[in-house]
Image (tube, coloured by chain):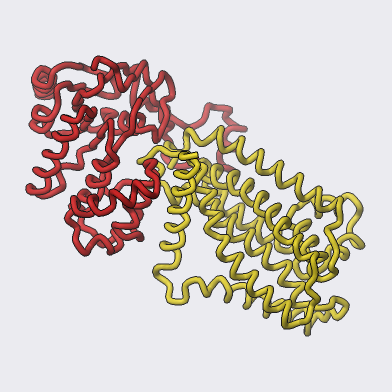
Amino acid sequence: MASINKFKYTVWNLILKDFRTQYRNMSLGVLWSVLNPLIMLGVLVIVFGYIHTNRAIEHFAVFLLLGLIPFNFFSLCINASTSSLVHNSQIIKKMSFPRIIIPVSTVLAQVIHLVIQLVLLVLFVVLSGVPVTLSYFWLPLILLVELIFILGLSLICSVLDVFFRDTQYIVQSILTVLFWFTPIFYPASLANENLSDFLYKAFMANPLSGCIEAARRAVLYQSPPEANLFIMACLVSILTLIIGIILFRKLEKNVADYL
Amino acid sequence: MNQDIIQVSQVGKRFKLRKQRPFIVHEIFRRLISKSARQEEDFWALRDLSFSVPKGCSLGIIGGNGAGKSTLLSLLIGASHPTTGSVKVEGRIGALLELGAGFHPDLTGRENIQLNASLSGFSQAETAAKMESIIAFSELGEFIDVPIRNYSSGMHVRLGFSVAIHVEPEILIIDEALAVGDGEFQKKCLNRIEEIKASGATFIVVSHSLDTIRTLCNEVIWLHHGKLMMQGDPNTVCDAYLSGQIPN
């Protein structure tokens, strides 16, 4: 018990460290966390609401936010955690502690951004008059699945980046690609119509797609997630986490030598 | 009393030396064409090193640049792992390796103490209880709430040393850093080291100052190119080290 408490205290201190070092030198500070998605949302609403009109989708702003927020959180976490071990080399080389707390605390430090953006979502839900129902209780579970996926990937990316520094650039490219191959500004049903069965399955194997789709059903259509898709997202996420833990355990011994 | 707190047996530490990380495309072509081994050189920073340190001993480590002293310390504190052999260390370690090690430049002194203490395995209550006495010992005054990027090197050492001795180490490890503090602070540190030693803790110091080694230690090992040249009482080993160095 005592060791778990100490572990929590260490993680908490690392989160505080990330937070302090990230925002100490900025005048707008945490506000950026709201501004960034707002700008993105504004652009997407203008492009897909007025230029390339898509009137078929009701409550388009909420629809967009339900895609953007999970994706932003994902992208923030993966970007930050990939370089986390390299950035903390000063601590890692001089001290002995379970290395795994570095990427984990880096991911947890981003949760504050998620919370702020969720407040934004609530605001839009209220403004646009989407009915509030019990199906909203699916959201915490959906976010938990996403978090598991993120933790798994961040373990993989952070430890690979130590031995192969190109990882951060590869990750950035993949994130850009993923932005388009995730149903953010279009519904997953569109992919279902236009992709072959195999491609659609590959498309939905990405837990992000599964989570976004489930979140939209919960908020916009007041219904539980589609069982097959959501179970798929859960399984892939858990599998990613298991692979991440195994890989990290295998490589962490030599991390200090390559920093 | 005769129980060994540190056991190093047949330890080797290999680093792979590369002039630069290989450009992957070039590397693939090169290997396809020449089929030669990778363009890496093995460098053994430590080779077949064995020694043990009894509890309460004060061990000095000497040797020229590149002898493997710092590599040995990082194995002892558990930051890296030996390629061959094994290192066994029992007990809480307080370590001060190099200037400002383990500190983040954007955090203030106080925040760094907190982070460092928690990474050393301190609970929140323990850290809070120690905080004021760490700050008092460092004599940093109002600088304690300034980001340490603005610290002088002497201030870094003050902070690092204060944290290292306050984790109530069973093993205190100091790498050369003492020399940076001013005379007054050095004296204070030496007094504190004597206190810690008197309480039965084990003390390990790496230094190029043989005077420091002779006064502080009752056992010395001399490393040369990763190998143990000699282990014994300070005067014998230091004299041998000095005489061994003159011909070069």
Between A165 and A10, the one nearer to me in the picture? A10
Horizontal and vertical percent for residue B42? 42, 27
Colour chain B appears in: red
Residue drawn 77% across the image and 50% down it: A233
Looking at the image, is A51 positioned above or below residue A104?
below
Q: Which chain is yellow?
A: A
Position of B15 compared to A48: left or right?
left
Position of A101 compared to A188: left or right?
left
Between B15 and B190, the one nearer to me in the picture? B190
- The quadrant of the image that shows the C terminus of chain A is top left
Residue A188 visible in the displayed image? yes
Residue drawn 33% across the image and 52% down it: B128
Horizontal and vertical percent for residue B24? 57, 42
Horizontal and vertical percent for residue A107? 56, 54
Between A68 and A128, the one nearer to me in the picture? A128
Position of B38 compared to A41: left or right?
left
Between A165 and A129, the one nearer to me in the picture? A129
